[in-house]
């Protein structure tokens, strides 16, 4: 059938087919999809905002593999949305682990007033597994990292709560007014 199409229509048709293959378009569509899924969650905006806040809080800590479990437990404790809590833990993902935890460590170091003695750059560049690296670290390093993670988690979760509550409240209000029309 493409043999019978004029040249200008064929090029538009190919552009339309290749439009979905563009990485930026795929990422944009994926973000939009997850945003729509998030705002369509069942529940009051306060519950969803609480879930997002505890998920971001849990995601700031280096509990790889336990972040979602801890976020769901915290969401249960604060009566937040468990699905939103689990989704929000992905603020720390394989692409952001090292920068986030390095930032958390430096922040903990700043607040605790410690020098650069506890961290060794070879830890992040070694061929050992994460478990072996964690086992070889000193308690001072872990204390500094967890203190920085606590500060980052608290600040990020407070910001997440207020921003998400406002956005979700506006979204739900607009949806309610459209339904009344």
Image: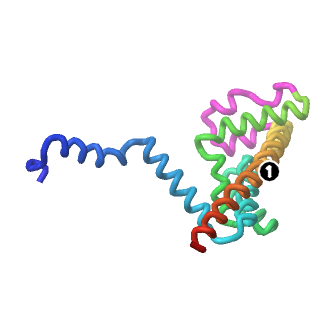
Q: Does the magenta stretch include residue 127?
A: yes
Q: Is residue 15 magenta?
A: no
At 62% from the left and 63% from the top, the residue drawn is 174
At 24% from the left and 47% from the top, the residue drawn is 13
Q: In which quarter of the image is the N terminus?
A: bottom left
Where residue 101 appears, as percent x and y from the top left, is 72, 39
Q: Quadrant of the C terminus?
A: bottom right
Where residue 102 appears, as percent x and y from the top left, is 72, 34
Q: Quadrant of residue 88?
A: bottom right
| Furthest-bottom residue in this view | 180
Residue 141 seen in this snapshot: yes
Between 147 and 82, the one nearer to me in the picture = 82
Q: Quadrant of residue 48?
A: bottom right
At 49% from the left and 47% from the top, the residue drawn is 28
Per the rendered image, the range of residues in magenta is 115-138
**Vertical relation: 53 (above or below) 8:** below
Q: Would you say 124 lies left or right of 58 here?
A: left
Q: Quadrant of residue 177?
A: bottom right
Q: Would you say 13 lies left or right of 49 here?
A: left
User: Regarding mark 1 in the picture, which secondary structure is present there?
Assistant: helix
**Vertical relation: 143 (above or below) 35:** above
Where residue 141 appears, as percent x and y from the top left, is 81, 36
Name the residue carrying label 1: 158
Q: Would you say 136 lies left or right of 91 here?
A: right
Estimate how packed mark 1 is, as few (under 14), some (14 to 19) or many (20 or more) residues with alpha carbons within 10 Å: some
Where residue 123 appears, as percent x and y from the top left, is 69, 32
At 60% from the left and 66% from the top, the residue drawn is 175
């Amino acid at each position: 059938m493409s043999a019978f199409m004029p040249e200008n229509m064929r090029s538009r048709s190919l552009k339309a087919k290749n439009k979905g293959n563009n990485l930026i378009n795929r990422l944009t569509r994926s973000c939009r999809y997850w945003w729509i899924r998030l705002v369509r969650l069942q529940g009051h905006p306060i519950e969803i905002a609480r879930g997002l806040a505890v998920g971001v809080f849990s995601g700031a800590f280096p509990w790889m593999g336990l972040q979602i479990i801890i976020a769901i437990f915290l969401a249960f404790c604060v009566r937040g949305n468990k699905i939103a809590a689990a989704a929000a833990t992905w603020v720390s993902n394989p692409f952001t682990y090292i920068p986030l935890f390095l930032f958390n460590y430096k922040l903990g170091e700043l607040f605790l007033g410690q020098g650069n003695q506890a961290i060794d750059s070879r830890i992040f560049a070694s061929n050992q597994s994460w478990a072996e690296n964690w086992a070889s670290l000193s308690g001072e390093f872990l204390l500094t990292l967890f203190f920085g993670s606590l500060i980052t988690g608290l600040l990020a979760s407070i910001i997440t709560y207020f921003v998400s509550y406002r956005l979700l409240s506006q979204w739900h209000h607009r949806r309610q007014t459209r339904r009344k029309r």
